[in-house]
């Protein structure tokens, strides 16, 4: 037996909706214990499915082991998906995942066995997690002959359960609605991928499209090398020295960007910042993906490398002008220019923008206080 106990994907906001869904499942389960007839009325039956039952069945559970297992998976994977989708978006996605899983069960079920449980909706959450966080790691607790913990890539963990459900979907019944699990996982995967593809969800260097893009670039580069391309300018085909130099720099920047991404995925921001400075020394125009650029800029400021941090923040604002928390970046730049670089005109410019764009009174007050301290202010 294996159970997930945590993930290494950090949260950037409180996943209130996921916690409320867990609470709702728990309250409904208590009602089931008091009034067992609820199950008969609100389960989803392939023989006579009603619209309400496509929603209600996902909040019912057979027993303590059933609800604890489902809620554990929902807590581990749902917090991060909630963080990405937002509270209302996550609620709509969760309910739709349960409905789609129920439809998959009703369509494929040959026996009139009713179904209940949040497993289909939770499977949709894990499918979306696979798209959004394929490079994360899951710490699992295993019970075999020994008891212990093990950290494995999330892509392997989720793929294992999906393939298990897919296998049992084609065998005789085990008493578990495997087709609902398969339908939910596919729904979550397709919806998550679609939201990234049309950019309704912000892209970053950790999602599955970025992972595929890096794999494809490596494949293309390896193909060029096999065809005789030499990135260091020693090809048998003569080229101008300037072109050879540009090719070598291009390959170095590509390699550095890949190393930066790997360092961030390991949460080694100090190494990522060091590699970023090397990248800028080769090509000052280089800008990282949005969250990576911001993380590196924050690390440079933390390391008290203020001129480099200011450059990284400036590049961030130029490349991502529509960032929804740009007021905080403007505030950081204003503080750096004011307190550490003594470039007061730039400090005044960014602090004024921070005040104008601020969504929180605390940040606005900090920007106004810093403006009042600048030379020439009364």
Image (cartoon, rainbow, N blue to C red):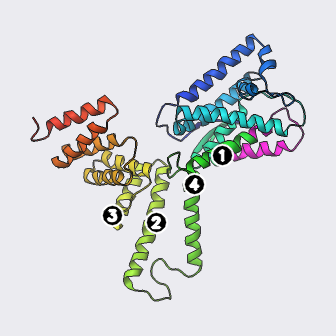
The answer to which of marks 1 and 2 sits earlier in the sequence is 1
Where does label 2 land, which residue?
254
| Residue 68 at x, y percent in the picture | 69, 26
Instruction: Bin the neighbour count of mark 1 within 10 Å (Cα to Cα): few under 14, some 14-19, many 20 and up.
Output: many
Comparing labels 2 and 4, the label whose residue is closer to the camera: 4
Where does label 4 land, which residue?
209
Q: What's the CA distance linking mark 2 and mark 4? A: 18 Å
Q: Is residue 123 above or below residue 43?
A: below
Q: Secondary structure at mark 3?
A: loop
Label 1–label 3 contact, CB within 8 A: no
Instruction: Bin the neighbour count of mark 4 within 10 Å (Cα to Cα): few under 14, some 14-19, many 20 and up.
Output: some
Q: Which region is colored magenta?
A: 157-181
Identify the mark at residue 189; answer none if there is no mark: 1
Q: What's the CA distance linking mark 1 and mark 3? A: 37 Å
Comparing labels 1 and 3, the label whose residue is closer to the camera: 1
- Residue shown at 56% from the left, 49% from the top: 196
Q: What's the CA distance linking mark 3 and mark 2? A: 14 Å
The answer to which of marks 1 and 3 sits earlier in the sequence is 1
| Residue 249 at x, y percent in the picture | 40, 72
Q: Is residue 196 above or below residue 125?
A: below
Q: Secondary structure at mark 4?
A: helix
Which quadrant does the C terminus fall into?
top left
Where does label 3 land, which residue?
284
């Amino acid at each position: 037996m294996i159970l997930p106990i945590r993930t290494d994907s950090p949260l950037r906001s409180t996943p209130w909706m996921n916690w409320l869904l867990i609470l709702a499942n728990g309250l409904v389960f208590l009602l089931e214990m008091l009034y067992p007839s609820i199950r008969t009325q609100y389960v989803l039956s392939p023989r006579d499915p009603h619209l309400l039952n496509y929603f209600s069945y996902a909040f019912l559970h057979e027993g303590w082991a059933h609800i604890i297992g489902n809620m554990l998976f929902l807590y581990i994977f749902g917090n991060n998906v909630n963080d990405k989708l937002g509270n209302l978006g996550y609620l709509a996605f969760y309910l739709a995942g349960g409905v789609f899983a129920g439809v998959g069960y009703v369509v494929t079920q040959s026996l009139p066995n009713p179904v209940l449980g949040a497993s289909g909706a939770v499977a949709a959450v894990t499918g979306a997690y696979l798209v959004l966080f394929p490079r994360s790691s899951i710490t699992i607790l295993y019970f075999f002959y020994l008891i212990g913990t093990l950290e494995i890539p999330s892509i392997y963990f989720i793929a294992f359960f999906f393939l298990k459900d897919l296998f049992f979907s084609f065998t005789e019944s085990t008493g578990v609605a495997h087709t609902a699990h398969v339908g939910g996982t596919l729904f979550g995967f397709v919806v998550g991928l679609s939201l990234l593809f049309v950019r309704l969800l912000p892209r970053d260097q950790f999602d599955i499209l970025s992972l595929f893009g890096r794999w494809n670039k490596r494949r293309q580069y390896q193909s060029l090398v096999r065809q005789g391309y030499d990135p260091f300018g020693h090809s048998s085909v003569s080229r101008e020295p300037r072109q050879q130099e540009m090719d070598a720099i291009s390959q170095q920047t590509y390699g550095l960007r890949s190393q930066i991404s790997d360092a961030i995925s390991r949460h080694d921001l100090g190494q990522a910042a060091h590699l970023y400075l090397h990248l800028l020394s080769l090509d000052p125009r280089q800008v990282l993906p949005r969250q990576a650029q911001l993380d590196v800029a924050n690390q440079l400021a933390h390391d008290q490398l203020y001129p480099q941090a200011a450059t990284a923040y400036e590049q961030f604002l130029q490349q991502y002008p529509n960032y929804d928390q740009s007021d905080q970046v403007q505030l950081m730049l204003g503080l750096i220019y004011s307190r550490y670089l003594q470039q007061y005109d730039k400090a005044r410019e960014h602090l004024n923008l921070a005040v104008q764009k601020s969504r929180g009174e605390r940040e606005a007050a900090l920007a106004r206080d810093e403006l009042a301290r600048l030379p020439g202010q009364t």
